[in-house]
Image (cartoon, coloured by chain):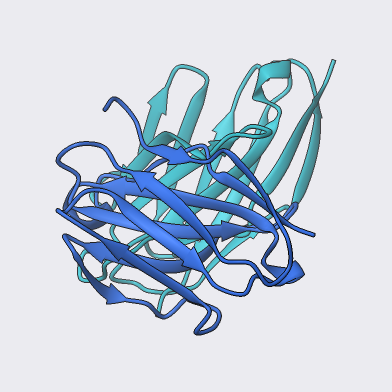
Amino acid sequence: GAGVSQSPSNKVTEKGKDVELRCDPISGHTALYWYRQSLGQGLEFLIYFQGNSAPDKSGLPSDRFSAERTGGSVSTLTIQRTQQEDSAVYLCASSLNRGQNGYTFGSGTRLTVV
Amino acid sequence: GENVEQHPSTLSVQEGDSAVIKCTYSDSASNYFPWYKQELGKGPQLIIDIRSNVGEKKDQRIAVTLNKTAKHFSLHITETQPEDSAVYFCAAINFGNEKLTFGTGTRLTIIP
């Protein structure tokens, strides 16, 4: 597609439930990144994919968070047993050449845990 | 690893005046420096970037300068307009690394 697509755009879930967030990167972009942005805060790195492998998972806050990427394209970020502190905007970005030409971000998924 | 500091965290300027946002980085091997603009409810968008072999780059009302010796780079917006109001993020990357390191953001408000 023309841009990075994320779905859903908004998600409200009850504490303790699992959620899946989806990212469709730009076609041909081999690198894919997940970031988290809490209200009024900066960009917190979560995980990076090169192709289908994840060389850097250092930002995942706990073992409740996991992500996968299939076919070198779509990625899913899964949060198990959601907590209120997981409420944030989850941003996905993709790039050519490992970010050496900048990232293209999606519009994000706003997750609210009630 | 790389560390990027960004100042100020908030900035208010009168419409028509200039705005300057400054960033410093720690890794002298960093060689690509993009700037992103984030409007309310949207993802960050790349507005301008600069590579380490260039000292300055300009695109209409936006310019970026890079001082490799001092390890700092700045975003300059001239003749500011209300639509420039947004959060701006700087970032840096070393070609040997695999992800951008972002600054903490500057909330720019243009006062009509």
Q: How many marks?
A: 0
Could you say where residue B97 lies in the image, as x and y percent from the top left?
26, 70
User: Splitting the image into 4 quarters, where does residue B86 fall?
Assistant: top right
Whether residue B45 is visible here, answered yes or no, is: yes
Residue lying at the far bottom of the rendered structure: A63
Question: Looking at the image, is A54 positioned above or below residue B100?
Answer: below
Could you say where residue B41 lies in the image, as x and y percent from the top left?
65, 34
Drawn side of residue A38 relative to residue A95, left or right: right
Give me the residue at 55% from left, 79% from top: A61
Drawn side of residue B66 relative to residue B37, left or right: left
Whether residue B55 is visible here, answered yes or no, is: no
- In the foreground, B92 or A60: A60
Could you say where residue A35 lies in the image, as x and y percent from the top left?
49, 59
- The chain displayed cyan equals B
- In the foreground, A92 or B110: A92
Give me the residue at 24% from left, 55% from top: A31
Question: Looking at the image, is A42 positioned above or below residue B49?
Answer: below
Could you say where residue B1 lies in the image, as x and y percent from the top left?
40, 80
Drawn side of residue A49 relative to residue B64, left or right: left
Drawn side of residue A12 relative to residue A114, left or right: left
Question: Looking at the image, is A32 positioned above or below residue A48?
Answer: above
* The C terminus of chain B, quarter of image: top right
- In the foreground, B36 or A85: A85
- In the foreground, A100 or A77: A77
Give me the residue at 34% from left, 30% from top: A3
- The chain displayed blue equals A
